[in-house]
Amino acid sequence: MRKKAKNKKNSYSLWLSGGGILVIFGLLLIFWIQSGNARVKEQTLAEGQTSYQNFCAGCHEASGLQLATKPPNLHGLFRRKKLPSGAPVTDQAVRDVILNGRGIMPPFKGTLSNKDVEALIQYLHTR
């Protein structure tokens, strides 16, 4: 009888140690995926910042422009409830304005790729 109990204990120990290896492997996999996602996010934000500087800052951060309507400041855009048009501030609403323009803002549909627009939106979330 004791021998049977001992074998049961050994199989449990083996299963537990195998499970421990799986847990460690799973945690390492999660860490690897998260670190890769962090690098992708950093790259996306850098690309968004570049697009912002190249295509947005010239008007949205300029002072003394001789325009009939001053472009809105985009700092804190995603912390606001509404866009100047009155539309709710959502990724899709901002995407539509970037691609199609609005008022005196020109459309960037043929100028910015979808990837550039998405990076720009992600960057605007951080401002």
Image (cartoon, grey):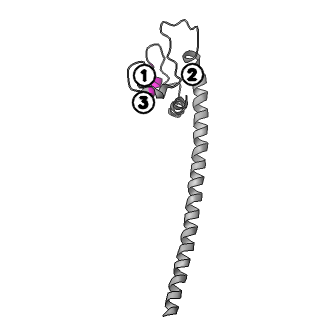
Looking at the image, is mark 2 or mark 3 earlier in the sequence? Answer: 2
Q: Which residues are magenta?
A: 94-101
- Label 2 element class: helix
Q: Residue furthest front?
A: 2
Query: Mark 1: few, some, or many residues within 10 Å (few <14, many ≥20)?
Result: some
Query: Mark 2: few, some, or many residues within 10 Å (few <14, many ≥20)?
Result: some
Looking at the image, is mark 3 or mark 1 earlier in the sequence? Answer: 1
CA gap, disc 2 and disc 1: 19 Å
Please tell me which residue is depicted at 53% across the width and 27% down the height of the picture.
112
Specify the label residue 64 is tagged with: none
What residue type is disc 1 on?
Answer: Leu
From the viewer's side, name the closer residue of 105 and 23: 23
Q: Which residue is mark 3?
A: 90
- Label 3 element class: loop
Q: Which residue is mark 1?
A: 83
Q: Is residue 36 above or below residue 110?
A: below
Looking at the image, is mark 2 or mark 1 nearer the viewer? 1
CA gap, disc 3 and disc 1: 9 Å
Q: Which residue is mark 2?
A: 55
- Label 1 element class: loop
Main secondary structure type of the part rendered in magenta: helix
What residue type is disc 3 on?
Answer: Thr
What residue type is disc 2 on?
Answer: Phe
Looking at the image, is mark 2 or mark 1 earlier in the sequence? Answer: 2
Please tell me which residue is depicted at 57% across the width and 25% down the height of the picture.
52
